[in-house]
Amino acid sequence: MRCIKCGEKAIMELPRHNSAFCKPDYLEYFETQVARVIRRHRMFDRNDRILVGVSGGKDSLSLWHVLARMGYKAAGLHIHLGIGEYSSLSYEKALCFSRQRGLELFTVDLAKEHGMNVTELSRTLRRAPCSGCGLSKRYILNREAYERGFDTVATGHNLDDETAVLLGNILHWQIRHLARQSPVLPSTGGRLVKRVKPLFMLTERETAAYALLHGIDYIVEECPNALKAKSLLYKDALARIEAESPGAKQRFLTHFLQDAQPRLQVGADDHVLRDCVACGQPTTAELCAFCRMWRQASERAEKRKRYRETASAREMKTAGEQS
């Protein structure tokens, strides 16, 4: 297998492009793809301050690395979710990456800020961990970007992520979600910061190769809470299709964005954004979903605490009477 550009031995084959690259040409290919997406979708320019959501995984660290190499003013934000050893290791990877490259990293600790980590929140609300986790990350990323004066939030969602979300939304006919699925979610004014996905046309495998070739040390383990997520089922199904028809995932997403989404956007969402009465962040209701979730969690936690205290007092009283 030879590199299609220079004829040297290739180290990376890309069946969907019917091509293969040596190390230097593959790194150039990857960065060219990112630059092209940024330019084509007008994601940001050299004057913008960009806040990268950094988990410690290959996608977010590769994105941060690419933007820094391109000369963009990009800082990172890591949200410590409190998912045991996984979160601790994720934070270490993000912190080590930023220090090695002299990049600015901000950190928000969910448990310190709200009194519960993702696992405790899930148990308190009796709902899947990914639900509260995703909502919390989106909220905190936007809030921190707005309060720190950033122009854009960038996340490391790749082609596999985007097509899995697309398939899930189609299977459940989530029209409003489909209407908003885009590599660029523009700011609508106020406190809502523009959100972009510069890696959305690159696969997970391609991003992993870029990280390895640049010596980026990232957390390899998957989040333990995501092991039963439906997105993994959708990714597996799409991977099987891709294996039989290289380029299927790219065509699936590209044709959706070009042909279907513009029609879905017309009248798909007639809600008006307003400021949340509790936190001031943008919402379509009086109280934003984040504040509603955490208020409910706090109320349930307090109710359980009172129940335990009452039960303990009864036990002590019974023990005293018996003695």
Image: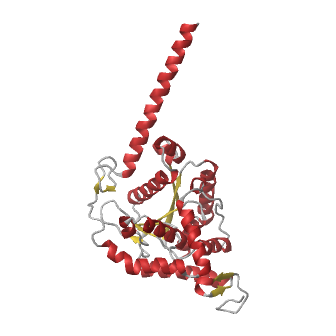
Q: Quadrant of the C terminus?
A: top right
How is colour applied across the structure in the image? secondary structure
Task: Give the image location of residue 313, x and y in percent.
Answer: 50, 18
Q: What residue is drawn where x is 41% and y is 72%?
A: 182
Q: From the top left corner, tell me how far across and down residue 204 is, in percent.
A: 59, 71
Instruction: Quarter of the image for the N terminus: give it.
Output: bottom right
In this rendering, the count of numbered labels is 0
Q: Is residue 95 above or below residue 85?
A: below
- The residue under the point 49% across, 67% down is 74
Note whether residue 257 is visible: yes
Rendering coords of residue 256 (x, y %): 42, 77
* Nearer-the-camera pick, 43 or 15: 15
Q: Nearer the viewer, residue 281 or 317?
A: 317
Whether residue 104 is visible here, answered yes or no, is no
Is residue 145 left or right of 315 when viewed as pictured?
left
Instruction: Locate residue 279, reporting x and y percent.
Output: 34, 49
Q: Residue at x 41, y 64 (%)?
A: 150
Taking 96 as reference, is 173 left or right? left
